[in-house]
Amino acid sequence: MSMKTGDRPAGTPPISMQAPMQVVAYTASVPKAGTRALAVEAAVNLVYGSVPHAVMMATPADLDDFAYGFSLTEGIVESADEIRATRVEVGSDGLRLHVELAPGRLREHLARKRAISGRTGCGVCGIEDLSDLPRAEMRDAPDVRVALPAIARALQGLDAGQVLGAETRAVHAAAWARLDGSLVAVREDVGRHNALDKLIGALMRTGTDTAAGFLVITSRCSFEMVEKAARLGAAVIVAISAPTSLALERAKAHGITLCAIARSDTLTVFTGSERLIPGG
């Protein structure tokens, strides 16, 4: 599996662009001209059957993975085999990501009739009632143990795997690590939810065993990130930034080990410390 953002169909917009700019020093009179790489942000309309479902602002890469992961975490499908095919259509106003569902699943989805827009911000824009807040089905988290040195190794690997991030300093990343800390896959996007959905989709498409590894994310860990991880079946989340109070509450409810503020030498464990094995 590729460890970097890519796999774009022909004609898809690039994932980065060079923009002219000037660097202005507070104490200098002459600005320094040059160019800087910017992450491309594009409107991606997910379409099921012929019915538009959501417009997401996303990085136009790994869109097949995005289709699978988004469909799972939104509760549109329960498994990869309920998606028959995906197709990207490039238009003047953005991209249309067509997702072909199995007939029975498509009927259930259309009957559900839910419209959302722009989930890269708070993650719940467009819902109509508090009861519609995303909540994954309660399940027993896998009984795994993760050694602290493996987490350190995964963090080091994540730094190297963020190709677009290194170029633009403007995207989030999500990675799946084996129990020894080696990375199975890294996905990047301007939206933290999208990066995680892309990673989940990549794992779905390859049939990766999520009972034997852990999740690493570069963004803050909000409640919907925990809910997506629960849908994936992840037992351990390692986040670079801090969690929110609701994220902690949901992690406890799902039996997920939540580690955050992860650095090269320390991390903060908020719940589920029994899964962590001290280093030698």
Image (cartoon, rainbow, N blue to C red):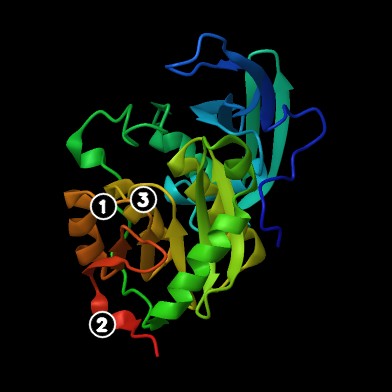
Q: Nearer the viewer, mark 3 or mark 2?
A: 2
- Neighbour tally class for label 1: few under 14, some 14-19, many 20 plus, Cα within 10 Å: many
Give the quadrant of the N terminus: bottom right
Which of 183/141 is in front?
Answer: 183
Seen in the image, is 194 located left or right of residue 163? Answer: left
What secondary structure is marked by label 2?
A: helix
Q: Is residue 241 above or below residue 43?
A: below
Measured as percent of width and height from the top left, residue 142 is found at 38, 78
In terms of image quadrants, where is residue 86?
top right
What secondary structure is marked by label 3?
A: helix
Q: Residue at x 61, y 17 (%)?
A: 32
**What label sits on residue 243 in the rendered view?**
1
Which of 133/103 is in front?
Answer: 133
**What label sits on residue 274 in the rendered view?**
2
Give the quadrant of the C terminus: bottom left
User: Residues at badges 3 and 2 in contact (C-beta under 8 Å)?
Assistant: no
For the residues marked 1 and 3, what is the alpha-carbon distance in whole angstroms? 10 Å
Q: Is residue 230 above or below residue 257?
A: above
Would residue 258 be seen by someone viewing this image from the given angle?
A: yes
Residue bearing mark 3:
225
Task: Tell me which numbered mark, 3 or 2, is placed earlier along the sequence.
Answer: 3
Q: Nearer the viewer, mark 1 or mark 3?
A: 1
Q: Residue at x 39, y 37 (%)?
A: 112
